[in-house]
Image: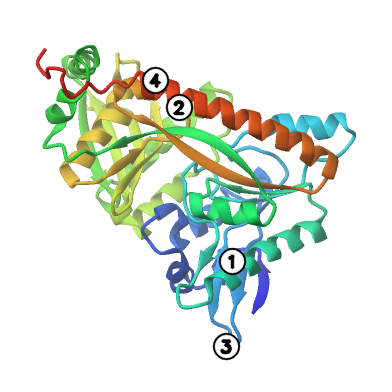
Amino acid sequence: MKVEVVPSLEAVPAADWNRLAGTDNPFLRHEFLVALERHGCVGERYGWLPQHLLVRDGTGTLVGAAPLYMKWNSYGELVFDWSWADAYRRAGLAYYPKLVGAVPYSPVTGRRLLVNGSADPEAVTEALIEGALDLGRRGGVSSLHWLFTPEDQTRRLELSGFLTRTGCQYHWHNAGYADFEDFLARLRSERRKKIRRERRKVGEAGVELGLYRGAAAARADWGCFHDLYASTFQRRGGIATLSQGFFEEIAATMAEQVLLVLARHGGRTVAAALCLVGPDTLYGRHWGCRETFDSLHFETCYYQGIDYCIREGLARFEPGAQGEHKVWRGFVPTYTWSSHWIANTALRSGIQRFVKMESRAVTELVEDLNAHSPYRLSTDSGAD
């Protein structure tokens, strides 16, 4: 098998990449990743230099791949390692550059080692891992990080000496609800009343919500969404790395997997949220607003998504990273993982101790939140 590195996915035919990645997880699709490159959302400007790994068999057929980036910062990863960078600085060492196997700006669990099912999966997986490590060593990186890895790939990376870091997100699961009221009936009374009150406030304010699949949204809608998205980052002192052109491209090339939620008031769009859709999962990504309406964020980003999953029969809703407040709205704590190789032996030892302590803390948090679930006991009455 031959391992090579390409600086852009435009060098790889979409059909070849998607044969490995599939189209179930929209973030791994060639169309999504290449749109980031075409519209300058990754590259030197933002410190995400594509270094994608490809593995070919003796016939030249692509049998393995990994989205990989050389990084000069930790922005847009959402597995926070600034304290690690600071430890390197205090030790008089450089933490950057580093290698990151991830989907930029997307805290979504998915395969990072893409393998053709007809090939020898273990041999291809080993070639990808060793290829990434070799690239890192030749590039003089401090570390190699695979972010938001599924559990099976996390365990496989552990066998290759990677440290496992445990995180937590909050996901909603569809228990076969007939409609939104059926979902509310499963919650404790105080939670149920609060959600009804939040939804009622949005309606009483005269805000109307509309959902649009990819191509159904007009160019003006995408322009409005981008302005709202960018304004959210500006208010928080962040960087809006995704361009209007990026949003328009994926709306055209992945129309069936792009969902835009628009909130209108008095004929004007006042808020919007972007979701991507998989066969069984809805992924909430970005949001923005230009006017303040009580509970509009919850309605646009959470309740519309739950409603959509129930109507479309989707099993899960992943609304993004962080946010314990989601638990009280029906989302449950869910473990996430990432895998880390640290070149410096001394610092690796300290980071290993850190991730073990962090893992215990995350486990305690999950157990505590589960002990105070918003869902009622089976013996509780669903009546208010």
In front: mark 1 or mark 4?
1
Residue 327 location (% of width, % of height): 36, 24
Which of the 4 image quadrants contains residue 239? top right
**Going 63% across and 37% down the picture, which residue do you hit?**
75
Q: The disc labelled 4 sits on which kind of residue?
A: His
Sequence-wise, the earlier of marks 2 and 1 is 1
Locate residue 276 relative to residue 82 in the image: left or right.
left
Determine crowd level at label 1: few under 14, some 14-19, many 20+ residues with C-alpha closer than 10 A. Answer: many
Q: Secondary structure at mark 3?
A: loop
Q: The disc labelled 1 sits on which kind of residue?
A: Thr
Q: Which residue is mark 3?
A: 59
Q: Which residue is mark 4?
A: 325
From this viewpoint, is residue 266 visible? no
From this viewpoint, is residue 338 visible? yes
Query: What separation in Å lies between label 1 and label 4 (alpha carbons)?
Result: 38 Å
Q: Is residue 96 above or below residue 374?
A: below
Q: Is residue 309 above or below residue 331?
A: below
Query: What separation in Å lies between label 2 and label 3 (alpha carbons)?
Result: 48 Å
Q: Which mark is drawn over residue 366?
A: 2
Looking at the picture, tell me which residue is in the foreground, 279 or 340. Answer: 340
- For the image, the number of numbered tags is 4
Which of the 4 image quadrants contains residue 59? bottom right
Sequence-wise, the earlier of marks 2 and 4 is 4
Query: What separation in Å lies between label 2 and label 1 (alpha carbons)?
Result: 31 Å
**Going 77% across and 43% down the picture, which residue do you hit?**
96
**Going 71% across and 37% down the picture, which residue do you hit?**
352
Locate residue 222 relative to residue 158 in the image: left or right.
left
In front: mark 2 or mark 4?
2
Residue 322 location (% of width, % of height): 47, 28
